[in-house]
Image (cartoon, helix red, strand yellow):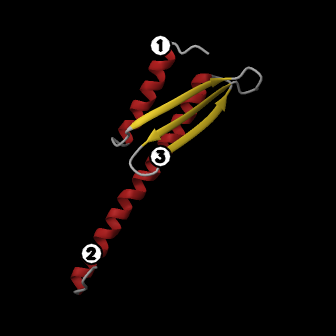
Amino acid sequence: MVLTAAIHSYVAEKVEHLEDITETIIAAHVVLLHDETRTKQYVVKAHLAVPGPDIHAEDAEADLYAAIDKVCDKLAQQLRKRKTKLTSTKKHKAQLETEGRKRGYARR
């Protein structure tokens, strides 16, 4: 499969939308595979390098653009889940600290 400018710009645009969710994306690696022997001919694998554990997604579809869309949706879902987990942890720690100060407990 030949990587055309249209495919490259489409993938780059999708990765830019992921940066709207979090600005901490260090690198993105996207692999596009075409296998004519399968019913779902196009396989898209993506790897996002972010602080902490990296994020991976993979999908196979009969249409290349549909596969890219599905992989980006999976990555966006994982990024939102990661962001929610990080912010709720920070809020929880701050809440414990303020409660401890109100009650006179020293946090170690």
* The C terminus: image quadrant: bottom left
Residue 25 in the image: x percent, y percent?
A: 38, 40
Residue 24 in the image: x percent, y percent?
A: 34, 43
Alpha-carbon distance for marks 1 and 2?
53 Å
Q: According to the image, label 2 marks what residue?
A: 97
Q: How dense is the environment of label 2, judged by Cα within 10 Å: few (below 14), some, or many (20 and up)?
A: some
Alpha-carbon distance for marks 3 and 1?
27 Å
Of labels 3 and 1, the one closer to you: 3
Q: Is residue 56 above or below residue 29?
A: below
Q: Residue at x 44, y 52 (%)?
A: 82
Q: According to the image, label 1 marks what residue?
A: 5
Q: Number of marks in the image? A: 3
Amino acid tagged 2: Glu
Residue 56 in the image: x percent, y percent?
A: 53, 42
Answer with the quarter of the image where residue 22 lies: top left
Amino acid tagged 1: Ala
Alpha-carbon distance for marks 3 and 2?
30 Å
Q: According to the image, label 3 marks what residue?
A: 54
* The N terminus: image quadrant: top right
SS category of the residue bearing label 1: helix
Left/right of residue 20 with respect to residue 42 in the rendered view: left
Amino acid tagged 3: Asp
* Circles 1, 2 touching at the beta carbon (< 8 Å): no
Q: Residue at x 39, y 31 (%)?
A: 16
